Amino acid sequence: MEILNELRSLITVMGLLCFLGICAWAYSRHARSGFEEAALLPFSDDDVPAPQGGRQAKEG
């Protein structure tokens, strides 16, 4: 049972280190430029025209 507790402790520490590593990467200056570019993607112009047979409002 001592081995099992040691394994659980090791997995917990590895999980914490992975979490801290991901946080450090997310807030690093190197990743910031990619995140800023991705944040502007919804506002970029689409090269694909809107479909012509879509839903249209009826006049009248």
Image (tube, helix red, strand yellow):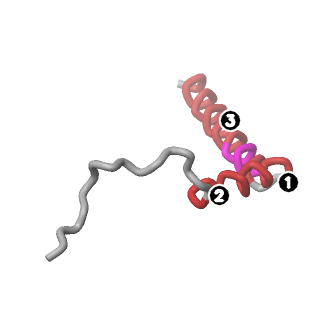
Write the residue at 65% across / 58% down: 40
Q: Which x, y percent locates residue 3?
A: 60, 22
Q: Which x, y percent locates residue 21?
A: 75, 43
Residue sitting at the far bottom: 60
| Residue type for callout 1 | Arg
**In this view of the protein, which residue sits in the foreground, 24 or 32?**
32
Q: Secondary structure at mark 2?
A: helix
Real-space CA distance between mark 2 and mark 3, rounded to the nearest whole angstrom: 31 Å
Vertical side of 42 occupied by 34: above or below: above
First in sequence: mark 1 vs mark 2: 1
Per the rendered image, the range of residues in magenta is 19-24
Q: Nearer the viewer, mark 1 or mark 2?
A: 2
> Is residue 1 toward the left or the right of residue 12 in the image?
left
Crowdedness of circle 2 by 10 Å Cα count: few (<14), some, many (20+)?
Answer: few
Q: Which residue is mark 3?
A: 14
Real-space CA distance between mark 3 and mark 1, rounded to the nearest whole angstrom: 24 Å
Figure quadrant of residue 4: top right
Write the residue at 72% across / 53% down: 37
Inspect the magenta stretch and tell me whether residue 41 lies in it: no
Figure quadrant of residue 8: top right
Crowdedness of circle 1 by 10 Å Cα count: few (<14), some, many (20+)?
Answer: few
> Is residue 60 toward the left or the right of residue 40 in the image?
left
| Residue type for callout 3 | Met
Q: Which x, y percent locates residue 22?
A: 70, 45
Q: Which x, y percent locates residue 38?
A: 66, 52
Q: Which residue is mark 1?
A: 29
Q: Which residue is mark 2?
A: 39
Write the residue at 36% across / 48% down: 51
Quarter of the figure that contains the C terminus: bottom left
Residue sitting at the far left: 60
